[in-house]
Amino acid sequence: MIGAGAAGLAAADELARKGRRVLVLEARERVGGRCWTRRMPGLQIPVELGAEFVHGEAKLTHALLKRAGLGAVDSVREQRFLDQGRLRRIDAFMEAQRAAELAVDLERDLSFAAFLARLRLPARTRDFARMMVEGFDAADPRRVSARSIAEEWSGGELGASQPRPKGGYGALLGWLANRIVANGGELSLGARVSDVQWKRGAVSVSGRFLGERFTVRAKRAIVTLPLGVLQAGPLRFLEKGGALRKLASGPVVRVAMRFHRPFWEKRAPGVAFFHSAGAPFPTCWTPLPMRAPLLTAWAGGPKAARLTGSSARKLVDAALASVESIFGNGQRELLAAAYVKDWMQDPYSRGAYSYVLVDGIGAREELAAPLGARRARSARLNSLLRRFHVLRVPHPHEHEVGNGVPGVVDADEEQQQGRRADGDQGFVGVSVRGERREREHRVRGQREQGMKQPVLEIGPVRPLPPDAPRHEDGVRRAAQAHEPPERRRGGDALPGNAQNRRDEQHGAEMDDRRRSERGAGLRRVQLRFFCD
């Protein structure tokens, strides 16, 4: 298990309870990942620097809380927003949902900002919809998929209840870690994984622990790293490149401030959330119903992107300026302590929440799919290729010949030589369509700029002649040998009149064969493979 955040611990707990041997590798010196519960002197309640609320139904989270004997504490939803110097009552969640509901039936996907621009909405509804996308999803409205926001918000994520785990998320995840070890699992902190090598039935994971190199081997591995880490490296999963490009990791900056007294209770008793759209931190909240002189300042999306990388002192100053925009000047003198967390600058997170880009619906499921499932699909494709005697372009790391140009392999020859076609060619799409007229083989073995693997286009297939060039001739010669004589250029064609006569004879045989196939109701196909 790579990663001891909420996902990694929950998966490891499930496996350990089923009697599986589990090793959890975590780069940090703590468990929890983007859930980080701290204690602040002078406060009797936990202070969260990461996740704090339980959104939506979250059946698994509530089941774990019940197992741990912790339960949840309902939060207070009363909100105010700053309007021309006055605090006015608002339900920001309801305002945002009014806009998102209209995106459910979009014919084509577009950014949430473009979607809002098309609607005739009250300015307040439009502003809070944008604020919720930035704050609740840490997303950039100009990039996030409007459809994905509509699906998320209509699924109960903005439901009536937003409880907190009793004792904070740290209590729950700490309990999970202890249960994993108690059930025979192993947990290593400070273990930084830098490489994963995988094949069917075996995985090798390497990295550093306490400055020393380590390698562990197992039958399977589960990777639960945050999206930002998967996108930045050092671990690279080329098979997941398409899914990773359809997702983004949103920034969040959070400042937890303890004051000498809860000054906000005098002006707005019983209010939990305060919104100031023009402030650097547009949202602040209290721990109600728990009473404590604690105020959290929160910025996500583009506003957090403008703050990220600043010093802790500058971030605290920006948070205090945001508080004073709501409650007036004079609050700085009441500050007693502050904790700051900039999640985009955390090398083990590189962001807070992930979000779906335009036309990226399904990318999360694609990213979560096991590599084995992809290889199974590729194996079926290989079976089809062998059946039609199709030239196969191997993976660049599978084998190289001559000057390093990937060899062209006849599937029948490969089978005779006992090679196993594992099928992982890096192809991401296949289309098969009927063709009635002959097309030539087109094999482009060269790598196009920015591509990691060769491109292969295959027309209706001809049987390979016995003297067709094999590995040693390389991709270019193999392709030329199967072109009709009229397409060859003098310097590139195989020499000799005998070769031309052989091609003419072969062409006549193919004409007879095509007529026979059409009489039997057979149709030729064209396979096109496009690299990721």
Image: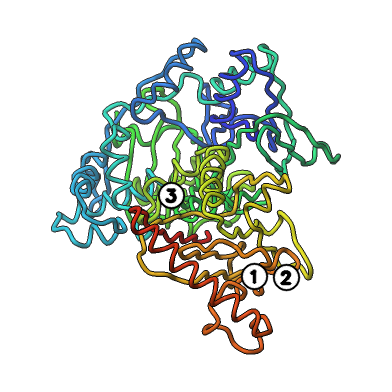
Numbered disc 3: secondary structure: strand
Q: Nearer the viewer, mark 3 or mark 2?
A: 2
For disc 3, the neighbor class at 10 Å (few under 14, some 14 to 19, many from 20) is many
What residue does disc 3 label?
300
Q: Quadrant of residue 523?
A: bottom left
Q: Are marks 1 and 2 in contact (CB under 8 Å)?
A: yes
Q: Which residue is mark 1?
A: 478
Closer-to-camera residue (508/86): 508
Sequence-earlier tag: 1 or 2: 2
Residue for point 67% across, 80% down: 494
Front: mark 3 or 1: 1
Residue 368 shows in this picture: yes
Along the line of sight, the residue nearer the viewer: 121 or 365: 365
Task: Say which amino acid is labelled 2.
Answer: Asp
Closer to the chain start, of discs 3 and 1, is 3
Q: Amino acid at mark 1?
A: Ala
* Identity, as a three-letter code, of the amino acid under mark 3: Gly
Image vertical order of residue 198 relative to residue 465, above or below:
above
In the picture, the disc for residue 439 is none
Instruction: Find the distance from the CA under tag 1 to the CA under tag 2.
Output: 7 Å
Asked whether the beta carbons under mark 3 and mark 2 sit within 8 Å of each other, the answer is no
Specify whether 384 is left or right of 522: right
Q: Earlier in the sequence, mark 3 or mark 2?
A: 3
Residue located beneath label 2 in the image: 473
Q: Position of residue 17 (x, y in %)?
A: 59, 13
| Few, some or many residues within 10 Å of mark 1 (<14, 14–19, 20+) | many
Specify whether residue 338 is in view: no
Residue at the limit of the structure toward the right, as seen here:
212
Q: Which residue lies at the image location 72% right of the left edge and 31% below the top edge?
A: 189
- Residue lying at 46% horizontally and 61% vertically, measured from the top left: 528
For numbered disc 1, what is the local secondary structure? Answer: helix
Q: Tell me residue 123's x, y (percent).
A: 18, 56
